[in-house]
Image (cartoon, rainbow, N blue to C red):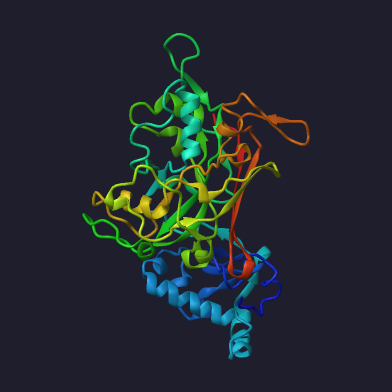
Amino acid sequence: MTTSWVPGADASAYTVANLPYGVFSRPGHAPRACARIGDHVLDLAPALHDEVFATGSLNGFLARGRRAWRDTRRRIQRLLSAEAGEASANRAATEPHLIPLHQVRLHMPIEVGDYVDFYCSLEHATNLGRMFRPGENPLKPNWRHLPVGYHGRSGTVVVSGTPITRPRGQRAPAHGDVPVFGPSVKLDIEAELGFVVGAPTRFGESAGDFADHVFGVTLVNDWSARDIQAWEYVPLGPFLGKSFATSISAWITPLEALEHARVPGRAQDPEPLGYLARREPWGLDLTLGVELNGEPISSPPYREMYWTPDQMLAHMSVNGASLRTGDLFASGTVSGPEQGQRGSLIEITWNGTESVKLSDGQTRAFLEDGDTVRITATAPGPDGTEIALGEVTGTILPSRN
């Protein structure tokens, strides 16, 4: 594996094989684009002499397309590598643009265009079907034929660390026919993987090769008000129970950094229609981690997902809906076959009937005010190393009156 002259980088999960992109600022300075190496950020505009990185968003860079993404990554790797013939000169020119991570503030890395959330975990879909439709087939007839999804609200996608206000809305009538209005009492999480679109498509055309359009991945927590969702989702699907907040990591990990994590994807039966045929292995061997108030409660495996992201992209654009730079689509809750692999509280507690026990003696069925959720993920890197995908965190604030 290529080594770096940056102190501590080779011993971290943010080596030159990773290099996620983000947006940072220092006190008194406007936000700018960066890449992470170890526990430092590299200010890309002066390091690469490229003003596209001098703005508070990665969108301008993402719009350049796949060749530019690849070439820029190679340039950054050369600047940070300890093995290149010009390593000494590169270090002298680059080191002034390295800033310790603890000295910066991280911001939303992209301007989100559209946001689509899918429902791609067989286990998650089956678990929810068993809860809400006992005695019936837990999967609807279409589920194994297409990746089910819905359009979310891009304006409420926020960066990791943003506090989440408990949403209000209607819930099913407790007595009689009149619904209840007030703060959600079944506030939940959804541990997901998000995909960031770089290169757009024209209106009326479907997307081509997955890696020509998707720049990278980010961790997602799609906060969910299960009681509001249960009352409103028939007949048109998720609305206020989902649209109040979706958190993403401050880091976008390029697809190129995940080459060692690629796997064929889960077997599918029946075979999907032709436009959903897998042409490359875009399953990803990622392990997510979910913490509640600092305590691990689940480790969902992404490689168990039924629908892969290339299939999500194909379905999302097959009707001619155009892609835009900055579009975000997410996998839906990542859940595995084991009880300790479920990616939402509604599954972990089986809709509140089996509480999570914390070390201080407290229990949780759903989130309470003041709770903090942290989602992380790791992937295999070169030569047995591990790549980190950052984290996405959020703390619950009381509902506003």
| Figure check: 206 above or below 99 | above
Residue at image position (46%, 19%) is 172
- As drawn, is 120 to the left or to the right of 378? left
Find residue 315 and report its horizontal and vertical position in percent: 32, 49
Query: Which residue is depicted at the point 26% across and 56% down?
Result: 206
- Number of labels in the image equals 0
Residue 324: % across, % down? 33, 58
**Residue found 54% across the figure and 79% down from its top:** 47
Whole-percent x and y of residue 142?
33, 36
| The residue positioned farthest toward the top in the image shown | 176
Q: Can you see residue 10? A: yes
Q: Is residue 71 left or right of residue 313?
A: right
Q: Which of the image's four quarters has the C terminus?
A: top right
Residue placed farthest to the left in the image? 204
Work out whether 331 lies above or below 42.
above
Which of the two residues, 112 or 203, is positioned nearer the viewer here? 203
In the rendered image, residue 234, in percent from the top left (x then y), is placed at: 36, 26
